[in-house]
Image (tube, grey):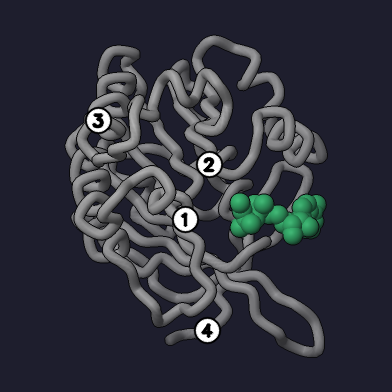
Amino acid sequence: MRVSSGVAGLDSLVGGGLPAGRLYVLSGPPGSGKTTLSTQFLVNGVRQSEAGLFVSMHESRSDIVEDMSGYEFGFDRAIDTDRLTFVDVFSSEGKRLFRPPGKHRDASSLVNRLTGFIDSNGIERVVVDSTMLLNHFLSDAESNTVQFLTSLKRTDATVVLVSEMTDPSAYADEHYLAHGVVFLHNFLEDGGMQRGIQVLKMRGTAIDTDIHSLSFGDEGLRVGERRGRN
Ligand SMILES: Nc1ncnc2c1ncn2[C@@H]1O[C@H](COP(=O)(O)OP(=O)(O)O)[C@@H](O)[C@H]1O
Ligand SMILES: [Mg+2]
């Protein structure tokens, strides 16, 4: 089964959609469109009556609603339905749901709470934005991050994990562990900043790994023509 990304032109780069139930990493520098793409992915699910979960480590619900209010893809309407759950991990609700009490922040309790929530609520699409603050929640960050990712892979949900990344050659554990990796690029060309998108890997399907142009429009991000080969 395939899941639509919700971004015009992206599904055709991955053979018609993302293989369902897998873990995808979305990487790119600040401002490259990671949060926008993630919300489009969740809204697409809500339109098909799928339950979604947005776990935010950076922005509050009202920040994201405001940031997405300039687009017509309808994040504000989606978030008002009971299909889409937004959890800001720093809010009191977020703490109650996901952050284990006490000092010892091991991965298993955080992960068990998150996967328990996904399973018991029949969540089909999950976004975790982003990995940057995982170190803040997990002691012994490296092995716990691996445990966190491995558990997310085992849920039935299709998961998009946002990974902040400024150096495109600095791969992290999540790039190796994920079933698929999508990169967003910002680069200077013809004196201006250009945006691009590139599918680096996607297990189980043929992919177009060329960089394609990426632009913001009324409906959010859309993928355009091929920019060049790597
Ligand atoms: N309509 C638009 N046209 C062009 N750029 C936009 C538009 N709306 C937002 N942006 C830019 O998109 C960026 C925000 O993207 P975002 O998804 O938050 O990126 P990330 O999560 O990767 O940091 C900002 O730099 C913002 O200025
Ligand atoms: Mg972001």
Residue where numbered disc 2 is placed? 57
Residue for point 25% across, 30% down = 109
Q: Position of residue 128 (x, y in %)?
A: 44, 41
Find residue 228 and name its label: 4
Find residue 140 and name its label: none
Element type where label 3 sits in the image:
helix
**What's the amino acid at mark 4?**
Gly
Residue where numbered disc 1 is placed? 132
Distance between mark 4 and mark 3 Cα atoms: 45 Å
Q: Closer to the camera: disc 3 or disc 1? A: 3
Element type where label 2 sits in the image:
loop
Name the image quarter holding the N terminus. top left
Residue for point 26% across, 59% down = 142
Distance between mark 1 and mark 4 Cα atoms: 30 Å
Q: Residues within 10 Å of mark 3 (few under 14, many from 20)?
A: some
Q: Closer to the camera: disc 1 or disc 4? A: 1
Residue where numbered disc 3 is placed? 109
**What's the amino acid at mark 3?**
Ser
Distance between mark 2 and mark 3 Cα atoms: 17 Å
